[in-house]
Structure formats: structure tokens, C-alpha cells
Image: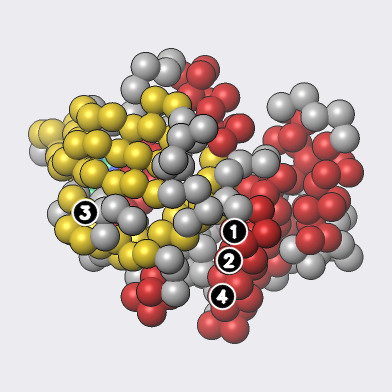
Amino acid sequence: MTSTAVSLRNVHLTLPSRAGNVDILRGVDLDVKPGEALGIVGPSGSGKTTLLMVIAGLEKASKGDVTVAGRSLSGLGEDELAAFRRDHVGIVFQSFHLIPTMTALENVAVPLEFRGAKDAMEIASDRLTQVGLGHRLDHYPSQLSGGEQQRVAIARALASGAKIIIADEPTGNLDHVTGEQIIKLLFDVKDQHGTSLILVTHDRSLAQRCDRMAEVLDGRIVAGAAP
Ligand SMILES: Nc1ncnc2c1ncn2[C@@H]1O[C@H](COP(=O)(O)OP(=O)(O)OP(=O)(O)O)[C@@H](O)[C@H]1O
Ligand SMILES: [Mg+2]
């Protein structure tokens, strides 16, 4: 057991672009404790989504140390990173990212089947019921409201058993009332399962409702890097 869920030390990310290399993350230090909710704010283009990608193992840091759920990601190859993501991080995006040709139940169950879970359908059904969608199991994403689709995405993140949930503007495509329900659900999940929640938002008042708020500016964390 480690005492931090996420620990970043002097993390840099440089990506090539037509105009030359872009330094997107420029020396990020960040700690998140188990069970802690961290709200991340910062201007558009400051590097918030990129930071989440690095924590989720979707982008590899060019320099520095990234430790998530007790594992250092630096030495992992593509297959190991994919396994790491599957087992340790649940990701909730602004635009839901559901598979349109699968029902709500299948969207949650199929990733579990990939992990070899024998009772994938049952777990998926339980998780969907938990987020209030027990009556929508056989609906396709196009037959669900935005808030319902986001709840499917949260059920999918939950079903993985991940102890870290990362959410990038999860209410950005929802009206205020529905967005508030989704936020409440994310906080409930954190409280009930002891997951860490890393929530990127443009809404400072929402970030302030987290246990801690961090501010990203120009590829660096300028406030709130440590508990
Ligand atoms: N694959 C890429 N290649 C080159 N540059 C990129 C790439 N992805 C992002 N960037 C650049 O990195 C910077 C940070 O982008 P990022 O998406 O992390 O910002 P953000 O803080 O999430 O912004 P927003 O609030 O608008 O979502 C931007 O200037 C963006 O153009
Ligand atoms: Mg972003």
C-alpha cells in the first residue's frame, strides 16, 4: 500500500506539431490521496486534459515520474499500460464515449468480459441499477438522454473496480439540473467506494466542493499540488 493514489514528480510532456515541438506539461508535481476528491481548474489550453491523459496512462510523460495506484508508469510498455488502465483507472469524458451499437448493459459488461469476468452481465446490471438505470439496461445510447448516457459511463468506470476515477468536464454537455445529479453521483461513488476522484472543470464553485482544488496554468500546477 502506498499513501498516495497518484503522485507526479517533475512531469514533462512534449509533443511534436507542425510548428515544432510543443511543451504541453512543463514540470508538474501533484499528489492525490486515496479517497480524495481533487478539482482541477485552469484556462482553456493550459494542459488539464493532457494531465489526465498522463495520469490515465494514455499519454507517456517525456520526463519525470508518474506513479498511479502504487505503480510507476514510466517503465511500462503498451500492453502493460493497457492492462493498467483497464484495472486501475475509470475515465469519464465530457462526451460520454459510449459504443453506439451496444446497449447500456453491453457498454458496461463488454469491458468486464475483456478482463475475463465470468459474471460480467450481472455486475454490469448491478452497477447500472446503482446509478439509477436499472430500467434502461436494453436501451442503446441514442435512446438515452445525455444525463443517462453519462450515468452509463460512470457505471462503466465503477464496474472496473478502479480506485481512481478521472472525469474531464463530465457535465459539460448537460443542463444544470442533470449536471448536478451527475456530480452528486460522482461524489456518492467516491464516498461509498473510497475512490479517488480527479475532476477537471471550468466551474470554480464545483472545484471548491472537492476536498482540494488545484490550478493549472501554462502546463504547470500553480496552486494546490499537494494535500
Ligand atoms: N496531440 C497534441 N499535439 C500537439 N499539441 C497538443 C496535442 N494535444 C493537446 N495539445 C496542445 O496542448 C495544450 C493543452 O491542451 P489540453 O487539451 O490539455 O488543454 P485543456 O486545459 O484541457 O483545455 P480545455 O479547457 O479547452 O479543454 C493546447 O495548447 C493544445 O493545443
Ligand atoms: Mg480539456
Identify residue for label 4: 179
Q: Which of marks 4 and 2 is nearer the N terminus?
A: 4
CA distance for labels 4 and 1: 17 Å
**Residue 151 position in % (x across, y down):** 68, 62
Identify residue for label 1: 190
In the image, is 158 to the left or to the right of 26?
Answer: right
Identify residue for label 3: 221
- Specify the amino acid type for callout 1: Lys
- Specify the amino acid type for callout 2: Phe
Identify residue for label 2: 187
Q: Which residue lies furthest to the left in this view?
A: 20
- Specify the amino acid type for callout 4: Gly
> In this figure, which colouring scheme has been used for the structure?
secondary structure
- Specify the amino acid type for callout 3: Ile
CA distance for labels 4 and 2: 12 Å
Q: Earlier in the sequence, mark 3 or mark 2?
A: 2
